[in-house]
Image (spheres, grey):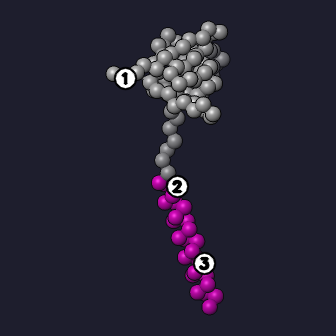
Amino acid sequence: MPKNKFILIFFICTISILICAINLSAQDEFTYDSKGRRDPFIPLVTSDGRLLKLEEEENKNLTMSLEGIIYDEHAISYAILNGEVVKVGDTIGDYQVLKIEKNKVVLIKEGETEEIWLKKEE
């Protein structure tokens, strides 16, 4: 009887290890999606202490395009700006979303507000 018990425990352990190995090999490798922003995992300083010269962000002089609004008077509203879903307080480029209304989004950049109106499709 002890021999059968040992074989059963060995069999259960072997199956458990095989299942774990299969799950580990089936996992997808994680890739970081920066969504156009600087990758925070790339250092800003070289190994000898020099600062790396960062490329100018493409969206410094970016023209904002309002593609859609999901407006909720009593909860969080969302807008689609340049293909990115944002809510009040989010930052896109150099702009911060100040307010989302039914037909427009108010952005602020360096203390100046800018309104972007939703264009009606014809």
Which residue in the rendered view is the most extreme toward the bottom?
Answer: 1
Question: How far apart are the two marked residues, 3 and 1, measured between alpha carbons?
Answer: 68 Å
In the image, what residue occupies the spot 62% across and 91% down?
A: 1
Image quadrant of residue 83? top left
**Amino acid marked by disc 2:** Leu
In the image, what residue occupies the spot 52% across and 19% down?
A: 104
Q: Are marks 3 and 2 in contact (CB under 8 Å)?
A: no
Q: Is residue 4 magenta?
A: yes
Q: Which mark is residue 9?
A: 3
Q: Name the foreground residue: 23 vs 58.
A: 58
Dot in front, 1 or 2: 1
- The quadrant the C terminus occupies is top left
Q: Residues within 10 Å of mark 3 (few under 14, many from 20)?
A: few
**Amino acid marked by disc 3:** Ile
Is 18 situated above or below 94? below
List x then y, in percent, for residue 29. Answer: 49, 44
In the image, what residue occupies the spot 55% across and 76% down?
A: 11
Question: How far apart are the two marked residues, 3 and 2, measured between alpha carbons?
Answer: 23 Å
Residue range in magenta is 1-26
Q: Name the foreground residue: 8 vs 116.
A: 116
Q: Earlier in the sequence, mark 3 or mark 2?
A: 3
Image quadrant of residue 112? top right
Is 3 situated above or below 115? below
Q: Which mark is residue 121?
A: 1
Q: Which mark is residue 24?
A: 2
List x then y, in percent, for residue 93. Answer: 54, 18
Dot in front, 3 or 1: 1
In the image, what residue occupies the spot 60% across and 87% down?
A: 3
**Amino acid marked by disc 1:** Glu
